[in-house]
Each structure stands twice: as structure tokens, then as C-alpha cells.
Amino acid sequence: MQRERELPHTPLLFLIALAFGVAFSLANTANGDYLIGLGSYDMTGPAADVNMMGYAQMEQVTAGVHFRLRARAFIVAEDSQGPRFAFVNLDAGMASQLVTIKVLERLKARYGNVYTEENLAISGTHTHAGPGGYLQYVIYSVTSLGFVQQSFDAIVNAIELSIVQAHKNLRPGAIFINQGDVVNAGINRSPSAYLFNPPEERARYPTNIDTGMTLLKFVDGQSGKSRGAFSWFATHGTSMSFNNKLISGDNKGAAARFFEDWFRFNNSKPSQITITKTISSESKLIETAKRFKATGGQPCEKTSSQNSKVRKNNGSLFVGAFCQSNVGDVSPNVLGAFCTDSGKPCDFNHSSCHGNDQLCVGRGPGYPNEILSTRIIGERQFQKAIDLFESAREKLSGKIDYRHVYLNFTNLEVQLQGNKVVKTCPAALGPGFAAGTTDGPGAFGFQQGDTEINEFWKRLRDILKEPSKQQVECQKPKNVLLSTGEMFKPYQWAPSILPIQILRIGKLVILSVPGEFTTMAGRRLREAVKETLISKGKGEFDTDTQVVIAGLTNTYSQYIATFEEYKQQRYEAASTLYGPYTLSAYIQEFNKLATAMATGEKPKSNGLSPPDLSSVQLKLLSPPFPDATPPGTKFGDIKQDINKGSFAKGENVSAIFWSGSPRNDLLTEGTFAVVEMLQGNHWIPAYDDDDFSLFFKWGMDEFSLHGLATVEWEIPKDAISGVYRLRHYGASKKLPTSPNEYFTGASSSFAVS
Ligand SMILES: *[C@@H]1O[C@H](CO)[C@@H](O)[C@H](O)[C@H]1NC(C)=O
Ligand SMILES: *[C@@H]1O[C@H](CO)[C@@H](O)[C@H](O)[C@H]1NC(C)=O
Ligand SMILES: *[C@@H]1O[C@H](CO)[C@@H](O)[C@H](O)[C@H]1NC(C)=O
Ligand SMILES: *[C@@H]1O[C@H](CO)[C@@H](O)[C@H](O)[C@H]1NC(C)=O
């Protein structure tokens, strides 16, 4: 590894460095090195009562934590004065326009114009198991009863703080790139629509999904130590079904958890990976303990970690992120979809069983155990990421660059081949949208591929909003079920202004798309952009240029299917908002941005910007009930202790505590649950609620309506034999306006052998 070279210490440079707050900004980046910053922050959010984002099922509300959600960020800069960009990957369903707007405001207040809409990308992993209510358009907040401030704040804070952390630790280093195929982590869930694409086009690809994973590895210039890795690979975050109520990062969050733990514990021996042994974070315990001390609650038990391996978050930060790509038609339920009544495969064209879409459900590799499926699909991505990480030899060099533009997708003119000009339409959803997918069937008797809407639904629809004549014509062959682009009451139902963005590090080009491109749609976009870069770039780009799609980035506008797939009107096509030429419009506009990048021009501002709807959001979610415990008990007391004195590895052990709502304090960067191990005469934290083996579940006692916290530990096969107990941390409020009172409680001890 080359040492960095020092720039002359002129006072001006020094002032600029101070202004930018870059600790190492006086160091130049020699020999193709960049300045690299990495950050990570907890964004778990409210673990009770909040509708989960993704399946749009009213009943699916959070009720605990399987493992925590994080915002993971990297910043790269050519050097302290040169171009830079920041990329943040969220364990969230998708990016949100309002989140992006508010994050940009905060970054502006901190850093002036260092991070703007132009050079900041915020991308969602597409987990369907995180708290919702953080998007601003009506259609994305119907089932969450509108906007949920707590979900929103958790995400905005985490993005901001992950960027602050990355900004503070910017220092010289190298970036390596690698690519390989992930085996059996995705399956096309709309193969009949894929078959609508031209045979000669399909013949160019081995399968109906993209299996490629592209990975960036960040290495410190001074110490030569690895600092993190970000990878892009397409598969849905739907290993957890809509029956799940525990907050979870789904398969990509799991992969990130495993990767970061692997780096801490097994770094040198990738062959001996034991992902179950993830040991509690000291920093989280300290964070949890701080609140308890600050409010005079019962002090934490001793959290010393002597003799215990813990996740340390101080300077040895390692960030492993798994980002989403052209995920539109890719399901992680790789065994395929089957009828729940007969066990037979579903109807090929409609994904239904004798006309009923709700009976047709996809199966993950751990079927019927969806937590196992999440783990397996997570592991498959994690294992490939390790391979790519260990064997990454190709060092990136060359420019950092970016381009960004807002577009009004309501009526974009699109020039097709042969000079034919067509237009996009206001946003609309077809009946196939209401049918849902095999990852989460919808309701009301719709089927994927439907192009008819019965009279009853038409009348209902027209009460909400009868689509305009132009809209009906424009969207064909989609039959308009909801003309969301023409609905403005009480505020906009769907976005019309969307950002598109290109980020570049040397030969790597990242396309930030505000939605879910299907496999073939993504291929067409990547190819078109690459061709444009090569043809316009005067040698800057060549066939070696690598184009990656970052899905669900900066805002959300559902799906983008190809023109041909649009004909079948399955879920992805019915959710392609702006009509049959949506993809053509993206390709045309990305080509313009690519041309600007290749020729070194900045596109003129078109004056468009997305609305900030924060002042008009409906917020109908009630605050938590005031907390109380049954007579003679207090918060943290045991309702149901462990049921025996000793357990075998592989068994489950659980205890139930009287508790307050997790919405009182999210215990961000802390934990609701800990497994403690006896060492000498001290209880040492061994696992926390971010561990895959530990479950924190929240609910109400059916009869008394008092809050209950269940701490359930699936004792890992490789747990150390010893004496353990389960501990719960929480906060209660007498009234919604009262201050938090912190409490903790522990189960009886038990042996594990
Ligand atoms: C950070 O880690 C180093 C090395 O492991 C350790 O010596 C130091 O005490 C830690 N600092 C904090 C604040 O935990
Ligand atoms: C699916 O639909 C296509 C036409 O869209 C038809 O040719 C094909 O036979 C159908 N397949 C099945 C299994 O019904
Ligand atoms: C987007 O285009 C539509 C149709 O021309 C127009 O009604 C709307 O005002 C435009 N939106 C913005 C923010 O310019
Ligand atoms: C252990 O608990 C977890 C979480 O509740 C559950 O998913 C799993 O099925 C349980 N395992 C056994 C063997 O009961």
C-alpha cells in the first residue's frame, strides 16, 4: 500500500480543510487512491403498533425486533477539493422523497453545499419488515394510517449520523472492484411476463434473472486494513412474509449482519465461518445503560466485557452493506410458488389457484420456516460477498463524477426509433397491482394479468377519482384501477417529479433509479447507458466500463417493466406508473445524463423540484396506551419465567416481562433484550436484540391490556456452555406526555450444556 503524499501547507488550503471539516484533507490521494469515509447507524424505529412498509397489509404492524435495521454509508472523494459523492444503503423498504429532502436540509446546515441532491444517493434494501409511514405520497401511507413521525425521524437521523461519521473518518485508501454470480438467491416471479420480451433478446442471457453481484472493497491507505464493502445484487426483501411482525432487515440485512460479524471474528479464516456466534455489542450496552443512569432508573448490570469478544464500534468500524438492484421481478422464494390448498404449482400466467390469487404463495429455501429462508438467502449473498471480497484484486482509478436531474414523468415526450414520438402518462395502477404477487398476494379477487375491472370496482373507483379520457387511452393496455397521478386529495397520491442520477468511480458507473426495474428493463438501461458513455466519451469509457443499477434510490415510484412485459399486466406491469413507455423515458433521460457525464457538461437546471408535503401529511396513528402493570408488580417483573433449569444447544428458552411500549424509547444503538452469561461473579452480556438468535417480542396481555415483553433465545449450536439469564430493558410512561421511566429485569439463571 502506498503512503499518501502531502500537499503544500498553504494557509488557504488549511482554511478550506477546516471549512470542510475533513480531518485528513491535507493529504493528497496518490497512486489512484481516493479519500474514503464509512459510517453506520441504527435506524430500527418503532417496534410496536406501526404498519410495516412493503406488503400494504393493515394487520401487519410491528411487534418486536428480530434484528436491527441500519443505515450504512460510504463517501468517496478524488481528494479534499475534488468531486465526491455519498451513498447510503438503508435497511428499509425503499428511499422516500421526504426523507431525502429533510436529510439534504440537515446536511446543508452542517456542511453547506458539500452534499446536495446531486451527489447524495439514498437507497433502500427493500426489506418488507421495517416500520412504515415515512413516505409522503398518499398511496404509500394508506395502510400506515398516514405519516409516522417516529419512523421518519429514526431514518433521517440514522442517515444523517452515518454520513457525519463517514465524513469525519474520510482518509486515503484504495477501492477494489470484483464481480461474480450469486447462486440460487433469486427466481423470476413473473416468468410469463418475461417471455413477452423478444426471443432474440432473451437468447442473449442464460437465465430470466440477473445473478451478478458487484462488490466494492474499501482498504485503508495507511494500515492496509479493510474498512468495508458495498455490494449490489437483485433479489426481493420478501423472505419474511406478511405474517411476520418482527422488525427485520430480511435477507440483505441478514447478509450485512453476517458479513460484519464475520469480519470481526473470523476475518482470517473464511472457511470456518460460524455466523451464529455473534456476540453482543459493548457500545450498545453502554448506550442503553446511559439512559438508565440519566433518568435515575435502575442501573445496568455490569457491562464490562473483559474476557468476552464484543463488537467494538470505535475506530475499528467495518461496514458491510448489501444494496438492491433491478429487483422488480426477482423473488427470494426460490422453491417457486405453490397453491396452499393442493400443493400444486399455480397457474402460470396469473399466479393464482383456480382463480384465487391468495392461495398462490412463494416458498423460500427454508419453507415453511421463513426465518430460516431469510438466513439462507442472506447467507448465499454473504458467502459470495466474502469470495469477492477476498479475491478482489482490481483497483479502481480515475474520476469521481456525478450527474442528477429531476424529471416530470407526467408527460415526458419520448422519441422512439424511427422518429416516432410518444408520451408518458400521469401515474396509474392497474388491477394486477391489487392482485399483489406470490411473495404477498393481494385482496379483493384481482388476479395478475387482469386487464378487466368489473362494474362494481369501476363505480367504487369513480367515487375516488374517475380517470380522465386521456389517461385511459395513455395507459393502455393497462386498465386504470387507481389514477393516482390524477388524485390530489387530501394531497398527492403519487409522485410526478422523480430524480435520476449517475455516480461514477473510475470504471464503475452507478445508476440511481427511483423504483424497481424488472430484470430485462434493467439490462436495457445498463446497456443503453454504457453504449452512450462509450460513444460520447472520447476514450474515457470502454467495454470494460461497469454499469450497476442501484434500485429504490432517492425516492420511490414503484415498478418499471419493459414495453413488452407491460402487455401482460402482471403485478410489475400494473405497477409501472407512467404507462407503456415508462422504460423508454428512463432510457432516453439516462442517455442524456450519460452524454453530459461523458462530455464533461453539466445539464442546465430545468427548475423542477419535488414537493415537500410534510405540512399536509395526515397522521392518524394513535400514541401508545399509558403503560401500567398489574397490582403488586412493577415494570421489569417477570410474568412468566424460564420453564426449566437447564437447556440444550438448539433449544429455545424464553421469559416474559411486564413492560412499557417500545415506542416510549426506541433504544436506538441500544437493545431491548440481552442474554447474559455468568463469568466469575459477573454477568457479561453475550447476545443482544441485533443477534439472529435472540428475539424481542412485544404485545399486550389479552385480558388486562398490560404491556408484555418476551425475550426468546434460540440457543445457538455453537454457544459456549455455561450459566445464562435473559434480561429485558424498557421504558414506561404513565401518560403520553409523562417522561420516560426506565426499568430492567432479568429471568432466573439457567444452564446451557
Ligand atoms: C477502542 O479500541 C481500542 C483497541 O481495541 C481500545 O484500546 C480502546 O479502549 C477503545 N476505546 C473505547 C472508547 O472503547
Ligand atoms: C399464457 O398466456 C399465453 C398468451 O399470453 C399463452 O400463449 C399461453 O398458452 C398461456 N400459458 C398457459 C400455461 O396458460
Ligand atoms: C408536471 O406535468 C404536468 C402535466 O403537464 C403538470 O400538470 C404539472 O404541473 C407538472 N408538475 C410540475 C411540478 O411541474
Ligand atoms: C424458537 O423461537 C423462534 C422465535 O420465536 C422461532 O422462530 C423458532 O421456531 C423457535 N424454535 C423452536 C425449536 O421452537
Image (cartoon, rainbow, N blue to C red):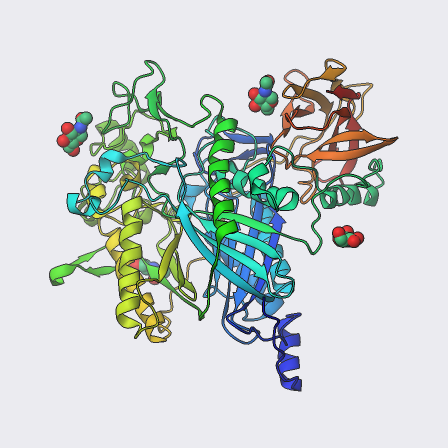
Q: Where is residue 531 drawn, in percent x and y?
A: 26, 63
Q: Residue at x 35, y 74 (%)?
A: 604
Location of the C terminus (image quadrant): top right
Q: Where is residue 247 drawn, in percent x and y?
A: 56, 35
* Figure quadrant of residue 281: top right
Residue 394 position (above or below residue 58): below
Residue 145 seen = no
- The reply, left or right, for residue 665 in relation to residue 253 is right
Q: Nearer the viewer, residue 523 or 44?
A: 523
- The reply, left or right, for residue 432 in relation to residue 729 is left
Residue 128 position (above or below residue 724): below
* Figure quadrant of residue 140: top left
- The reply, left or right, for residue 422 in relation to residue 14 is left
Q: Nearer the viewer, residue 3 or 237?
A: 3
Residue 565 position (above or below residue 752): below
Residue 692 seen = yes
Q: Residue at x 52, y 45 (%)?
A: 386
Q: Which residue ends up furthest to the left in the rendered image? A: 418
How many numbered marks does the figure carry?
0
The quadrant of the picture showing ligand 3 is bottom left
Location of the N terminus (image quadrant): bottom right
Q: Where is residue 457 drawn, in percent x and y?
A: 27, 30
Q: Residue at x 66, y 84 (%)?
A: 9
Q: Nearer the viewer, residue 169 or 426?
A: 169
